[in-house]
Image: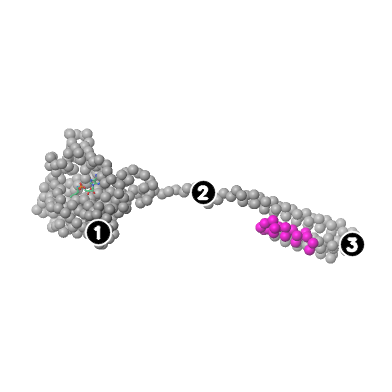
Amino acid sequence: MTLDEMRAALDDALRGARAAIPGAGDVGALDELQRSLVGKRSAAAAAKEAIKGLAADERPAAGQALGAYNAAVAELIDARRGDLASLAALEGHVVDLTLGGHGRVRGHLHLITQVQRELEDIFTGLGYRVAEGPEVEDDWHNFEALNIPPAHPARSMQDTLYVALGADEQVMLRTHTSPVQIRTMESQVPPIYVVAPGRTYRNETLDARHSPVFHQMECLAVDRGLTMADLFGTIEAFAKRLFDDDSVRTRFRSDFFPYTEPSAELAVSCVFCRGEGCRVCSQTGWIELGGCGMVDPSVFTAVGLDPEEWQGFAFGFGLERIAMIRCGIDEIRTFFDNDVRFLAQY
Ligand code: FA5
């Protein structure tokens, strides 16, 4: 081997070393590489052997070339050994950053608002508009125009939360959404098809099914020629949509409300037991939702509509009750406690 051939062989081997050493995955692989680069059968060993056969004046240069090669390989090997040692030390202290942080929990609408929006959707689909009224009402809209005479039990302090404004017992927190019927008929010309959802208040003791603050939805239709068949058909259509079940039946039992005549208590067959009787429906097979009836002629007269010309039906029901039935909730207080662990479920 000539001096030039020896230099060329060492250059080749060093290029290979530069490519291979940084990729050695562990100490074993690195040792193996080191043996192949400077061990017994390496280019370095061959060069060392070749030096013996060179002319005396070429040997110093050949020795220098071999020394430079050995030093370069040693540097590359040492650097990689250091890297591998650092990686091994880190392995014991791994911090998995992909699991860090808690993210942001997105809130959502309260269950009662969800039920209210869904009902609004159902009724607007049937051609109704959404109406609103104030939560602080006057005697005329909450009682008088609804044909609730001064002596009616619903007016007693027991049920009504009065506001200390104006004359005694003339301003109150509305006890139902029915005053929106009056406000709508006072401000709009029939035909009228509206629903009025909203918060209502009664001076009642809190228990599992009653709260002093709750929500109702009122429905009012005023048109020519409306009959109880329209009332029943509308309620049946909305109940089937609400419970997403075509087999839901509706039941109307005679009742009394001063502003409807005839009046009925409105119930639907229990969606849990299909009328067989279960815990949710207290073994009756029926779930009471609210009240309904044909608008009393005296209400039309109070708002200046001719009862001979116009007929109407109205109904009102509690939103908490509907949410409780739909979600199997047996305690009304949970809606108002604002415990996020409860609310987040719905
Ligand atoms: C009324 O409030 C009538 N205005 C309904 C009506 C409208 C009849 C139009 C005729 C025509 P009632 O007091 O029954 O009716 O209440 C209706 C529903 O509201 C009840 O069935 C119940 O679901 C709900 N509700 C009443 N009081 C409470 C309360 N304290 N807590 C929770 N929900 C209640």
Q: Main secondary structure of the magenta part?
A: helix
Q: CA distance from mark 3 to mark 1?
A: 113 Å
Specify the segment rendered in magenta.
23-41
On-image quarter of the N terminus: bottom right
* Residue beneath the point at 23% across and 50% down: 317
Q: Pick the residue in front: 2 or 334.
A: 334
Element under disc 1: loop
* Amino acid tagged 3: Ala
- Which badge, 1 or 2, is on the more N-terminal residue? 2
Residue 26 drawn in magenta? yes
The label shown at residue 55 is: 3
The label shown at residue 276 is: 1
- Which badge, 3 or 2, is on the more N-terminal residue? 3
- Dot 1 and dot 2 residues touching (CB under 8 Å): no
Q: CA distance from mark 3 to mark 2?
A: 68 Å
Horizontal side of residue 59 vs 173, given as left or right: right
Q: Position of residue 51 (x, y in %)?
A: 86, 61
Q: Position of residue 64 (x, y in %)?
A: 83, 56
* Residue beneath the point at 20% across and 40% down: 159
Question: Is the residue marked 2 within 8 Å of ligand 1, measured from its CB?
Answer: no
Q: Is any atom of residue 190 visible in this view?
A: no
Residue 168 vertical placement versus 64 (above, below): above
Question: Is the residue marked 3 within 8 Å of ligand 1, measured from its CB?
Answer: no
Residue 136, quarter of the rendered image: top left
Q: Mark 2 = which residue?
A: 100
User: Badge 3: how crowded within 10 Å, few (<14), some, or many (20+)?
Assistant: few
Q: Pick the residue in front: 79 or 1.
A: 79
Residue 328 vertical placement versus 246 (above, below): above
Element under disc 2: loop
Residue 33, quarter of the rendered image: bottom right
